[in-house]
Image (cartoon, helix red, strand yellow):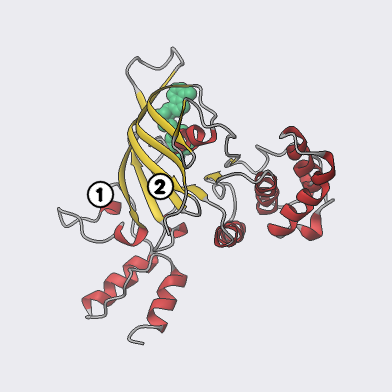
Amino acid sequence: MTQQLLVELQDVSVKAKSRQVSEGVFLLQCIDLSIRQGEWISVLGMNGSGKSTLCKLLAGIHPFEISGAVLVGAEGKRSDILPGAAPIVMQHPDAGLIGSTPWEDVVLMLERHGFPEKEIINRAEEALYEVGLGERLHQKIETLSGGQKQLAAIAGCLAVAPSMLLLDEPTAMLDAEASAYVLSRVRRLHESGVTVVWVTQLVEELNALDRVLLLDKGRIVFDEPAHHLFSGGESGQSPGEHYGFVPPYGVQAARELMNRGIVLKPMPINRRELEQAVKHYGS
Ligand SMILES: Nc1ncnc2c1ncn2[C@@H]1O[C@H](COP(=O)(O)OP(=O)(O)OP(=O)(O)O)[C@@H](O)[C@H]1O
């Protein structure tokens, strides 16, 4: 069954309004993009490639000049700005938090979004349990780890039942353990049906079956499953390497195996996928 269309961008280009930016400089150019209910989209790109701008555009936060068409909902209603703006989790764990505890933060978020008073407590607690902070509802924010703060921010976003969850490099400020924890929690939320746009510069965070949007100088230069990112390419160089990404361990090991006649399909990207692919090879 075709999943419901949430957003469609047709030939969208974006310029900054700020006078300091030289005229004619595009932050995003000729973007064609459809996002459907339940998708996981990993947005990949080097510094300055336009990832945050795309995220802000989808969140309805945009101090930009926009051309092209932004269509929302199943009926494809034309809109200048995305209504019911999707909430966004930023890089810095403290960036979006306003309450003094996770519970208070999510309650304030719900109040700001105008939810009826009688629903607020249940919704807040449900969202906090969902991200795994059920034991820390009333712990002071400043005593939470970076990963837990990100999860509190994610709970705030989830509580308002958005059509999609936008995360702009949410692991950039976290250590490896906290990053893995936040990523696995968001993967679980996705499995439960949440549409996720996950911005990253880390190819290790991709899963082979993720839809990857690779941005370069404000343009989408690749929109395919992640396992195609490090294979083929017209010049013999994969798209990922062409745009400056080093193949992650899963890909390097899979290539090594391929040289020995063992072909893993789809090509694994991360260690977990490599382990699974090797375990099930030939079965
Ligand atoms: N409001 C703005 N005014 C002027 N230029 C902007 C504005 N916002 C972004 N830019 C410029 O647009 C380009 C894309 O920025 P953006 O933050 O979207 O990139 P990014 O891929 O998210 O980068 P990073 O990975 O470093 O966060 C950059 O060159 C940036 O300087």
Q: Quadrant of residue 115?
A: top right
Q: Which mark is residue 195?
A: none
Q: Quadrant of the N terminus?
A: bottom left
> Which residue is label 2 attached to?
44
Q: Looking at the image, can residue 65 be seen?
A: yes
Q: Position of residue 5 (x, y in %)?
A: 45, 46
Relative to 281, does residue 164 appear above or below in the rendering? above
Q: Residue at x 76, y 49 (%)?
A: 123
- In the image, what residue type sits under mark 1? His
Relative to 120, does residue 147 appear above or below in the rendering? below
Q: Position of residue 188 (x, y in %)?
A: 59, 62
Count every numbered label the image shows and give the total. 2
Q: Position of residue 198 (x, y in %)?
A: 50, 49
Left or right: residue 126 versus residue 67 is right
Q: Looking at the image, can residue 140 be seen?
A: no
Q: Which mark is residue 242?
A: 1
Q: Residue at x 31, y 73 (%)?
A: 265
Instruction: Classify mark 2: helix, strand or loop.
Output: strand
- In the image, what residue type sits under mark 2? Leu
